[in-house]
Amino acid sequence: MQTVFSGIQPSGELHLGNYLGAVRNWVALQDLQEQDRTQCVFCIVDYHAITQGLEPGELSRRTVEMATDLLACGIDPARSILFVQSHVPEHTELAWVLSAVTPMGDLGRMTQFKDKSDKQPENINVGLFSYPVLQAADIILYRAQVVPVGQDQLQHLELAREIVRRFHARWGEIFPEPQARLTSTPKILGLDGNAKMSKSLGNTITLGEPDEVIRRKLATAATDPARVRRKDPGNPELCNVNTLHTFFSDVDRVQWVREGCTTAGIGCLECKGALADNLIAHLAPIRARKAELEARPALVEEALREGARRARELARATMLEVRARVGLWS
Ligand code: SF4
């Protein structure tokens, strides 16, 4: 039996970038669990989020919203372990042990540390610096062998593997070295067509947005700049609307976009309208489940409590062994 671990920041409501880049893959992994003899462990990483200076009320609200959206998207707490990181204090305990074998120089080379420091120069805290150590603890606490990641997380995973090797060199082997499973999803750009879809940039569509808002937002989405006039042909490869069609439209519709765009047979508004129809139809069952969960918040709470109970069972067993190896007197 192999374990797959993945974490997500409690950024509140999911947007299309999170959904396509991570959550859709989580649901697919969960569906393959039995056939692949895999156990999925999914974590809402609220300890990581406090490095960013969120207000306390905002952090808890976003955590619950994220959990609700994950359940609405199909994460099934009966089949996967879904929990909130801070409900399992062994994460920070193991991170402290790992910090004793992690060189400062390795952490200083992490590009995400540099990027995040640039984004919040007034709050470059130690947590931001040691973030990858906690991330390594998140993974190996469950002895996960597989971690689905995007290209931007590969450097952190390689460091996690190095930390495991250093732990083993000092205290003996107990963990598998986690392997990356690179997601094949291309980078989902925001509606501006420039940067990755991100709430802080205001270029997202969230899963719970009303139909008319989705239509309005898509109508303003950036397209291939070559299509200045209706009669100008375009290149769908340069257009984020086309990328979204490949996820939400069937093959015939994708072909219609390709032909219509390159020959100027269709206009961009027509193309975006077709995308809006398909996206709204795709999101309808997710939004219906989300409404049910919002009407019964105890279901979300119960799922997270049960997830934390199961996660903690695994985490405690790992920490018992870690403490013994390290020589902490008990
Ligand atoms: Fe993009 Fe569609 Fe316009 Fe082509 S027709 S540029 S794919 S919106």
Image: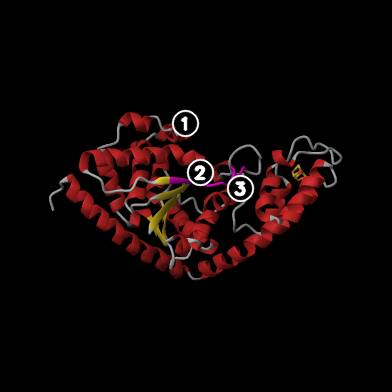
| x, y percent for residue 96 | 26, 43
Q: Residue furthest left?
A: 329
> Measuring 45% from the left and 64% from the top, which residue is drawn there?
34
Q: Quadrant of the N terminus?
A: bottom left
| x, y percent for residue 321 | 22, 52
Q: Nearer the viewer, mark 2 or mark 3?
A: 2
Magenta span dominant secondary structure: loop
Label disc, if present, on residue 204 of the rendered structure: 3
The amino acid at mark 1 is: Asp
Binning the other alpha carbons within 10 Å of mark 2 as few (below 14), some (14 to 19) or many (20 upward) gives some
Label disc, if present, on residue 6 of the rendered structure: none
Q: Badge 2 is on which residue?
A: 150
Q: Is residue 21 magenta?
A: no
Label disc, if present, on residue 118 of the rendered structure: 1
- Alpha carbon distance from label 1 to label 2: 21 Å
Range drawn in magenta:
180-189
| x, y percent for residue 189 | 62, 42
The residue nearer to you, when weighing 163 against 212, is 163
Q: Nearer the viewer, mark 1 or mark 2?
A: 2
Q: Mark 1 near mark 3, Cβ–Cβ under 8 Å? A: no
Q: Mark 1 near mark 2, Cβ–Cβ under 8 Å? A: no
Q: Is residue 82 left or right of residue 88?
A: right
> Measuring 39% from the left and 55% from the top, which residue is drawn there?
3
Question: Relative to 187, does residue 118 appear above or below in the rendering?
Answer: above
**Of the image marks 1 and 3, the number of the one nearer the N terminus:** 1
| x, y percent for residue 31 | 51, 62
Residue 273 can be seen in this image: yes
> Measuring 33% from the left and 64% from the top, which residue is drawn there?
309
Q: Secondary structure at mark 1?
A: helix
The amino acid at mark 3 is: Thr
Binning the other alpha carbons within 10 Å of mark 3 as few (below 14), some (14 to 19) or many (20 upward) gives many
